[in-house]
Image (tube, coloured by chain):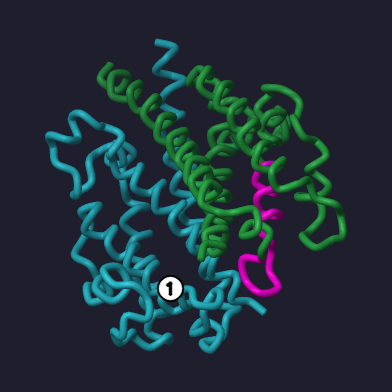
Chain colours: A green, B cyan
Amino acid sequence: METTETTLPETSLFIKMAVSAWKQQNERVDKLLDKLSDEQLKGDIAPGKNSGTYLLGHLVAVNDNLLPLFGFSDKLYPELQNIFLTNPDKSGLVQPAVADLRKYWHEVNRKLVQHIDAMQPAEWFTRHSAVSAEDFAKEPHRNKLNVLLNRTTHQSYHLGQLVLLQK
Amino acid sequence: METTETTLPETSLFIKMAVSAWKQQNERVDKLLDKLSDEQLKGDIAPGKNSGTYLLGHLVAVNDNLLPLFGFSDKLYPELQNIFLTNPDKSGLVQPAVADLRKYWHEVNRKLVQHIDAMQPAEWFTRHSAVSAEDFAKEPHRNKLNVLLNRTTHQSYHLGQLVLLQK
């Protein structure tokens, strides 16, 4: 019985921790975007490396993919997949305008946060749409919360690069 | 009763997910270090930005700090604090040789992994040494597991920068 009492708050605690960490990364990107001009964003993070616009489009596309992966909705901007996920930067594909990318970033996250804030704790431990029920039975850590943890570190990785665009 | 059965595996699952994510970041740094020559590591990640050696020393110092923060032991290399945490790069302070930094990185992580692998699930939800018992009562998310989550995203941030040293 004691176990129940100590475990229940733990479950909601670590969901709070994981969701807070993910939101914090989004907020850090928000703050950086407010500081960077469009011209700065168009620059490369280092000579010969990815541009800021490519990385921003990449982060939007990755977050947009969470909508179907978590079973919330279709993607808002499916056209970003080819430009920012399937292909590398400088592939010659036409990118959306910087102003649009900024708008997409906020739109995708607003929609994601709405859905995420409405989730029940148990839902976080269900499988995401890219893992089969059969595989999930053998690998129960491949749940939605694990995807969120991975996306948090992925976003932090690229945030560490985007900050280099600052003067 | 049903709650007990579903919550207990969730707790151990989440700890497994968080520890795996942290170890995965360490392994990614390991792999990158194997690829980078000492000369490459001495270079700056972008013109006028931090050097690879500074970032490596910074990551070692941060991980070394986890030993006392989690109550495992004293730091192995307390002298790194001043060079890589208190002061910025290019501060004029003498840095350890690159070969030593590589060795420290592996030593600190080996010791940390030993302790972490021996932790009981409930220990992860106890406070770390930098939060008072009083504050912890009000903010129970300030536990050891939360520190590990934060360190994972912090390390990923700098890994995103260190990869720029690759040709």
Q: Front-most of A38 and B47?
A: A38
Query: Which quarter of the figure has residue A3?
Result: top left
Give the x, y percent position of residue B112.
34, 61
Query: Which quarter of the figure has residue B62?
Result: bottom left
Give the quarter of the figure containing the C terminus of chain B: bottom right
In percent of the image, x 21 and y 58: which residue is there? B68
Give the x, y percent position of residue B141.
31, 34
Give the x, y percent position of residue A149.
52, 41
* Residue stretch in magenta: A44-60
Q: Look at the image and say whether residue A49 sits in the magenta stretch.
A: yes
Q: Is residue B119 above or below residue A106?
A: below
In percent of the image, x 19 and y 44: which residue is there? B131
Q: Front-most of A52 and A40?
A: A40
In percent of the image, x 43 and y 35: which residue is there? A20
Q: Is residue B164 above or below residue A97?
A: below
Characterize the local packing of mark 1: few (<14), some (14-19) or many (20 or more) Cα atoms within 10 angstroms. Answer: many
Q: Is residue B7 above or below residue A61?
A: above
- Three-letter amino acid code at disc 1? Leu
Q: Front-most of B122 and A85?
A: A85
Give the x, y percent position of residue B99.
42, 86
Residue of label 1: B56
* Left or right placement of residue B81 versus residue A34 in this view: left
Q: Front-most of A8 and B45?
A: B45
For the question of whether residue A109 can be seen, the reply is: yes
Q: Look at the image and say whether residue A54 sits in the magenta stretch.
A: yes
* Left or right placement of residue A146 versus residue B140 in this view: right
